[in-house]
Amino acid sequence: MSETLVITGARLLGADSADIIVENGTITEIGAGLSRAGARVIDADGLVALPGLVDLHTHLREPGYEASETILTGTRAAAAGGFTAVFAMPNTSPVADTAGVVEQELALGEAAGYATVQPIGAATVGQKGERLAELGAMASSRAKVRVFSDDGFCVFDPLIMRRALEYVKSFGGVIAQHAQDPRLTEGAQMNEGTVSAELGLAGWPAVAEESIIARDVLLAEHVGSRLHVCHLSTAGSVDIIRWAKKRGIDVTAEVTPHHLLLTDELVRGYDARYKVNPPLRREEDVLAVREGLADGTIDIVATDHAPHPSEHKACEWQAAANGMVGLESALRVVHQSMVQTGLIGWEDVARVMSAAPARIGMLAGHGTPLEVGRPAQITLYDASVDGVFTEADLHGRSTNSPYLGRPLPGRVQYTVHGGVVTVDAAAVVEELNG
């Protein structure tokens, strides 16, 4: 149950500092010198007030892979990173390809209470790419699924991809594609380039991503449907999305925090924390995706939070699992790579990490400006501090972060989800409301 809050001195986007009153999960007043008898007071002097962050690409692992993460621990990590809503990818066991599984995920998220969990349904049965999953049943279920994806598996068959795009048009859904030509990436261990040649590791070429994106934007144009490109990572992919948008194709794209900051040079140490799919790319690609995010070609930042048990990473490079956790570090990485470099401001951060992902995923009650009458989804961020990212900053079940030991600016001080304080001074509340 939400409580009455008085948030004092917060830095509102595009405005001066102000006080915010939250009652019954809603922002009821914004102004100066505000108070409420019996209210909990949050001193937000100097803190940036952002609408609660929304992640369109999170792996919560439940059901089936609870050794890596659960919906409880994953949403706790999300709250610690300032997120009030996450979209859960379908690579669970059983796969989230039926109404029953997505409704189970929704209920587990509601029980956890740290963030809204919006399930993403698999596009094909079992994520096998052979026949469409129960898209209509998932869309009409209590979970109201609007985003469908085979996630780590590319929908490679162009006819299946066309049918999926056609099907979701009836309810305004979107197909989110993992753009990877499997024939061009067989045995791939890292980005194909100079570093892979020097290390003798099989390369994952940029064209394997770019060719699928080019095909799919043309399919989306042909059928008049919505396409979303997951974790775009190359300069060529940015160019294709830019071309498609100029052409009027209904396509959106995301970039991960790690592709905004880290490069394939890190693979030289064979530290499996840096093994991810798509792989870390060249410095030229990092600069290109930053530019694409800044100019609006890339619509959002999404974490691709992918937890793994330590034994899946503490092994030789070739055997290690792909993926890295990212919920707790995402805002800080965007702060470092985009805000401190002068490429975007905090209003843009609110757009790419809250408003746009909520819009793409059609998630009501999130991504809205901090205004009177709006739901109280609020992230209060201290942009003035610096610190080294450590395991103490991680609040999920796994610790496979590429940022451990790395200096990162800023810190989430408070997260308010539906009027409930889920993070207080960067310490996740173990029992909501006492």
Image (spheres, rainbow, N blue to C red):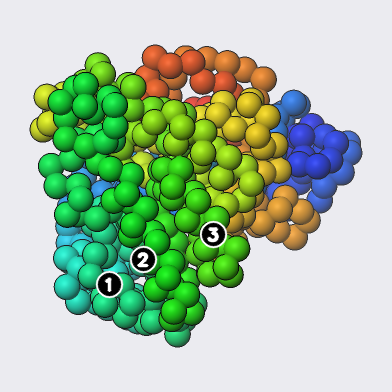
| Outermost residue, bottom side | 170
Q: Earlier in the sequence, mark 2 or mark 1?
A: 1
Q: Is residue 249 left or right of residue 197?
A: right
Secondary element type, mark 1: helix
Amino acid type at mark 2: Arg
Q: CA distance from mark 1 to mark 3?
A: 21 Å
In the image, what residue occupies the spot 44% across and 28% down? 283
In the image, what residue occupies the spot 77% across and 34% down? 11
Asked whether residue 176 appears in the rendered view, the answer is no
State yes or no: discs 2 and 1 in contact (Cβ < 8 Å): yes
Amino acid type at mark 3: Trp
- Per the rendering, the mark at residue 66 is none
Query: Up-down: is 248 above or below 260?
Result: below
The percent coordinates of residue 309 (x first, y second) are 19, 33
Amino acid type at mark 1: Pro
- Which of the two residues, 282 or 64, is positioned nearer the viewer here? 282
- Which of the two residues, 258 or 49, is positioned nearer the viewer here? 258
Query: Up-down: is 388 above or below 294?
Result: above
Mark 2 surroundings: few (<14), some (14-19) or many (≥20) residues within 10 A: few
Name the residue that disc number 3 marks.
243
Q: In front of the other: label 1 or label 3? A: 3
Name the residue that disc number 2 marks.
215
Q: CA distance from mark 2 to mark 3?
A: 13 Å
Secondary element type, mark 3: helix
Name the residue that disc number 1 marks.
158
Q: Earlier in the sequence, mark 1 or mark 3?
A: 1
The percent coordinates of residue 238 (x first, y second) are 49, 49
Mark 1 surroundings: few (<14), some (14-19) or many (≥20) residues within 10 A: few
**Where, by quadrant of the figure, is residue 31 drawn?**
top right
Q: CA distance from mark 2 to mark 1?
A: 8 Å
